[in-house]
Image (cartoon, rainbow, N blue to C red):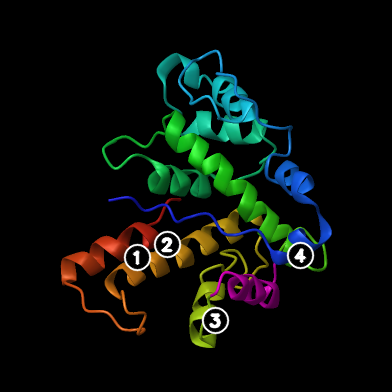
Amino acid sequence: MAYAPSAPELPESFGQQLDEEARYTYAYPYGQPTNQLGSSGMFSPETHPDIVRSFESAGGNRSGFLDESELRHALSFSGYEGISNRTIRFLLFIYKSPAESLLRLGPKEYAELWNCLAQWRAMFDRYDSDRSGKMNALELRDAFYHLGYMLPSSVLQLIILSQLDDGTGNTVDLCFDRFLECGMIVKSLTEKFKEKDPGYTGYATLSYDAFMSMVIPFIASYD
């Protein structure tokens, strides 16, 4: 079973502020894509060269896969520094191939993750209205609204409570990696629910096994 959600759409404000070329550059912050294969030869011709470079910089061209430490290195190479160990493991789990028993990403899965992160980053920057580098409860609510999720206040409160500071017991504003986790969990579970609710009624009937398979991967501890 695949768990990774589809990428969020870029905020409308980017369409108003930037032309087509600029929006493309935003999604690929290190240059324009070319039709050249990386030296590893493991990527499709249309793969952005920075995806290939970051994959190879972490040693993926040797084994054909990225494990936890290598994925952290590859994402840091791409400008995503400071992502927690928990989030790295979470990303590995939901993006790995369903046929892969180990927590590692091949070229295809890494390219999907890399492209998706750019759009989550764009959304985070758009709704971090005070430019603090963190997202508070109101900003999080607005971001979910952009995704099309008018979450009940009780659900939003549960999400916020899940981000308790273990040292103080106080809720904390979300940095990018925590926002990424929350956003992917809500989007993934909603997409999984919609598969069982094709009529978009807000109700679904599913077996116990299906329910557990849907939910457990997203509530498991990756610490």
Q: Is residue 19 left or right of residue 223?
A: right
Mark closest to the chain's N terminus, 3 or 1: 3
Q: Mark 3 = which residue?
A: 150
Q: Nearer the viewer, residue 151 or 112?
A: 112
User: Looking at the image, how many numbered discs can be counted on the residues?
Assistant: 4
Q: Is residue 128 left or right of residue 63?
A: right
Magenta-drawn segment: 135-148
SS label for mark 4? helix
Where residue 27 sits, quadrant-wise, is top right
Q: Is residue 168 above or below residue 59?
A: below
Q: Which mark is on residue 106? A: none
* Magenta run includes residue 137: yes
Residue 137: tell me if it is visible. yes
Kind of residue indicated by mark 4: Ser
Foreground label between 3 and 4: 4
Label 3 neighbourhood size at 10 Å, few (<14), some (14-19), many (20+)? some
Query: How far apart are the alpha carbons under marks 3 and 1?
Result: 17 Å
SS label for mark 3? loop
Mark closest to the chain's N terminus, 3 or 4: 4
Q: Mark 2 = which residue?
A: 188
Label 1 neighbourhood size at 10 Å, few (<14), some (14-19), many (20+)? some
Q: Mark 4 = which residue?
A: 13
Query: How far apart are the alpha carbons under marks 3 and 4?
Result: 19 Å
SS label for mark 2? helix
Q: Position of residue 70 (x, y in %)?
A: 52, 28
At 56% from the left edge and 64% from the top edge, which residue is drawn?
A: 166
Q: Position of residue 179 (x, y in %)?
A: 60, 61
Query: How far apart are the alpha carbons under marks 2 and 1?
Result: 6 Å
Kind of residue indicated by mark 2: Ser
Q: Which mark is on residue 192? A: 1
